[in-house]
Image: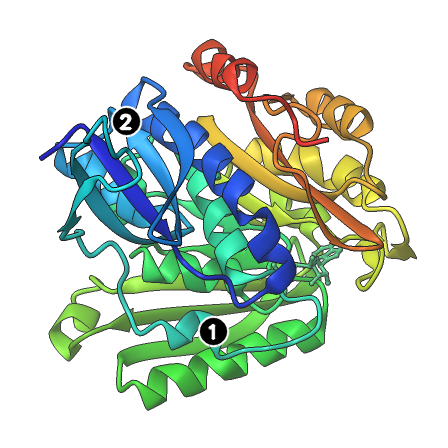
Amino acid sequence: MSEVSLLLRAPSANRVYAQAAGALSRSEAHWVLGAHLGAVPSLRDREVGGMAGLEVRGATGGPRSEALLAMLSGTLGVLDVQQEDPQDPDRPLLRPRPLPAVLRHPSDLETTLRYTGKTNEQFTALLVNLAAALSARRAGILDGTLDLLDPLCGRGTTLNRALRLGLSPVGAEIDRKDVEAYRAFLGTWLRTHRYKHTLETTRLTVHGEQLGSRTEAELAPDKQTLRAGGGQRLTLLGCDATRLGEVLPGGSVDALVGDLPYGVQHGSRAGGAWQRSPLEVLREAAPGWRSLLRDGAGVALAVNRRTLDHAEASAVLADAGLRVLSADGAFRHRVDQSIDRDILLAVPFDHPRAEELAALGADQEDPIP
Ligand SMILES: C[S@@+](CC[C@H](N)C(=O)[O-])C[C@H]1O[C@@H](n2cnc3c(N)ncnc32)[C@H](O)[C@@H]1O
C-alpha cells in the first residue's frame, strides 16, 4: 500500500455546500487525522481525470487510519496513488482501495426526513467526526462506545448519524413538533426495516417539575441481542437544552455536537422567552453542558457568524470552563445571504490533550476570508 491516498470526494446534493466542500473536507481531515493519529498528514486538493479529490500523504496502513479515511464526511472512495511519473504527474497509477465498513443501517435513516431547518447530512457527519476526534475517548467512534449528545437535535440528523456509526446517542429538543416528528419517523423506520426494537415515551420530571418528555429506544438485529440489552440505545429528551444539567448524569458525555439556532429560520429559546440571538441560549446552557462533559470531551458547535460573534461565543464558553481551539472562520462557509456558517471547536480547560489539540488549530491553514 502506498503512503499516498487520494480521497475521492462524494458529490453533494446541496449546490451551495458543494462549493465549500473542498475547504471543509481539508479542514476536517486536518483536525480528525491530526487528533486521532497524533501527526497531521500532508493534505492537498488534487483533481484526477476530472474528479475532485483530496490527496493525503502519511496516513495509511493501519486499520485505524483506514477506518478514519472511510469515515470522513466527504469520502466517496479511496485510491492508492501507486506510482508518480515525473514526466506525466497528471496521470498517476491509481488503484482502488477497499474501505472498511464504518456505517451500519441503511442510509435512508439519514436521508428520508426532509424539512426546513435540517442540517445537511454531510455537514452533520463532519461535526460528529470533529467532536469525537477531540475526545480522549475518540477510539469509541470506531467501536460504538463514544457517548454523544446533541442538545439541539431538531429532527435527529445528528442522532441518525450517530446510530449509523454504531453509537447510542442522546438528543434534546425544545420544539414539541420536532420531537414528535422525529419520534414518529424513528418508529416507522424501525418497523419498516424490521428491527427488533423497543420505543417508549414517558414524562420527563425532575424534582417534581415536569420538564417535557423522554423517549427511549433500543434497536437490535435480533430478539436475543435485544433481550440481553445488547442493542443500540437512543434517548430523545423533549426539553429545554438549558436544563440538561439537571436531567442527565454529570460527566457522562464524550462528544457534544450542536447546530445552534441561526437566529433566522429558527427561534432560539432561553429562559422561556423566544430570542433572536443564540448567544443567550449558549450563555444559559453552557455551564450545564460543561457539567455533563467528561474532562477529556470534545465539542463541535455550528454557528451563524452573522448572529453569533466568535469572540463573544468564546468568552461565554470560557466562562463555562470550555476553551475554544478553532480560529474565527476556520470552517467558514456561506449557506445563503443570512447564514455565514462556521464551527467552534472546544474542549474543557482540564482536557488532558488541550495543548496538543490547540496546536492543531494553530497549524491549520489560514481562515477562509
Ligand atoms: C439549527 S437547528 C438544528 C437542526 C438539527 N441539527 C436538525 O438537523 O434537525 C437548532 C434547533 O435548536 C432548537 N432549540 C432552540 N433553542 C433551544 C433550547 N433552548 N433547547 C432545546 N432546543 C432548542 C430549535 O428548535 C432547533 O430545532
Residue 39, position as x, y percentages in the image? 32, 17
Q: Is 1 situated above or below 13? A: above
Residue 368, position as x, y percentages in the image? 67, 31
Task: Classify mark 2: helix, strand or loop.
Answer: strand
Residue assigned mark 2: 57
Q: Is 293 situated above or below 108? A: above
Q: Report if residue 368 is visible in the image.
A: yes
Q: Nearer the viewer, residue 267 or 8?
A: 8
Comparing marks 2 and 1, which lies closer to the viewer? 2
Q: Residues within 10 Å of mark 2 (few under 14, many from 20)?
A: some
The quarter of the picture showing ligand 1: bottom right
Residue 221, position as x, y percentages in the image? 19, 74
Which residue is drawn at the image coordinates 42% and 42% (left, top)?
129
Residue assigned mark 1: 111
Q: Is 132 situated above or below 222? A: above
The reply to whether the residue tagged 2 has its Cβ within 8 angstroms of ligand 1 is no
Q: Nearer the viewer, residue 273 or 366?
A: 366
Dot placed on the residue nearer the N-terminal end, 2 or 1: 2
Q: Does 290 sit left or right of 228 as displayed?
A: right
Which residue is drawn at the image coordinates 85% and 50% (left, top)?
271
Amino acid bearing label 1: Thr
Residue 59, position as x, y percentages in the image? 24, 28
